[in-house]
Image: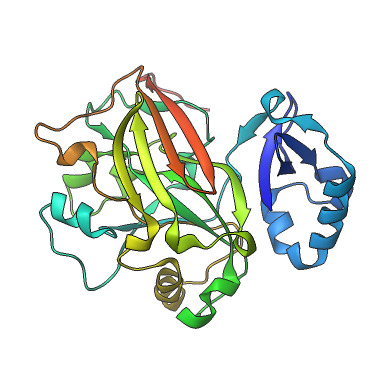
Amino acid sequence: MRLATFSTGDSPRVGAVVGTSIVDLSAEVGATSMPELIIDWERLRLRVEAVISKNTDHPLSSVRLHAPVLRPGKILAIGLNYSDHCIESGLEIPKEQIWFSKASSAINGPFDPIERPAVSEQLDSECELVAVIGKRCRNVSRSRAREVIFGYCVGNDVSVRDWQLRTSQWVLGKSFDTHAPVGPWITTSDSVEPHGLDIRCLVNGEVRQSSNTRHLVFDCYAQVECLSQAMTLEPGDLLFTGTCGGVGAARRPPVWLRPGDVVRSEIGRLGAIENKVQMGSSEMRIE
């Protein structure tokens, strides 16, 4: 099943994508947000299936798709998790998982613009499989990690490289506003195997990254096992599971994204997101 957050000129609501249409679920099942739907999924699933069988509310082309989870509690991302990306970065394949956070304010819609910040020209993209946590959990074994992942979507771990690398902590360079576009919807985990999906990134139609999620150094279940030993994972948390080789920073010379560039991130069976780069503002704003 494919579940999305969408709007038609009013406030965002949740829906199910069926073919080229989207079925409004908010009124029918009583969930006004994706986290509410995820938390109550076991009870609501049969009702959702019944609603889908009777309705085709809106053509997808007539709605705006938002990030499936509008404000996740946590956005966690793993670094150096494809061997070819380690090699192009001049680093050894890690023996332990390397995690950092992206601010939740970086979340962005699947087709909304991403900003090149006024403070840097070193804007880069990283196409990634994103896992969406479905159950509040702690100390989950790898063998049971599948149970706590609600589904998967496409993400772009947009990075400002000089800000990322000028200190040992990557959070600032990974957390600029608009730098976590995700979507276009969540494909529920019962309908997709996450570790055999083609993944690629195109910039202005040129393929920059191309791999398959079978090449993850630490797979999705190992990631859940590791993280849940340190913290409680909660419904709607997002895990960016790593990027493959081909990033702009590794090219010689580096190739940075510029205003006007169109970045398309694709993952087989999950869909694609596409974001145009625009210049960010340096204007002070206090609200």
Q: Does residue 141 show up?
A: no
Q: How many marks?
A: 0
Front-most of residues 222 and 49: 49
The percent position of residue 87, horizontal first and vertical second, equals: 14, 55
Front-most of residues 56 and 177: 56
At 42% from the left and 38% from the top, the residue drawn is 265
Picture colour scheme: rainbow
**Left or right, 195 with reference to 258:** right
The percent position of residue 268, horizontal first and vertical second, equals: 48, 48
> Can you say whether 177 is above or below 191 in the image?
above
The percent position of residue 195, horizontal first and vertical second, equals: 44, 63
At 79% from the left and 61% from the top, the residue drawn is 45
Q: Quadrant of residue 189?
A: bottom right
**Left or right, 104 with reference to 256:** right
At 51% from the left and 28% from the top, the residue drawn is 112
Front-most of residues 55 and 124: 55
> Can you say whether 45 is above or below 272 in the image?
below
The percent position of residue 220, horizontal first and vertical second, equals: 44, 66
At 81% from the left and 66% from the top, the residue drawn is 43
Q: Does residue 228 show up?
A: yes
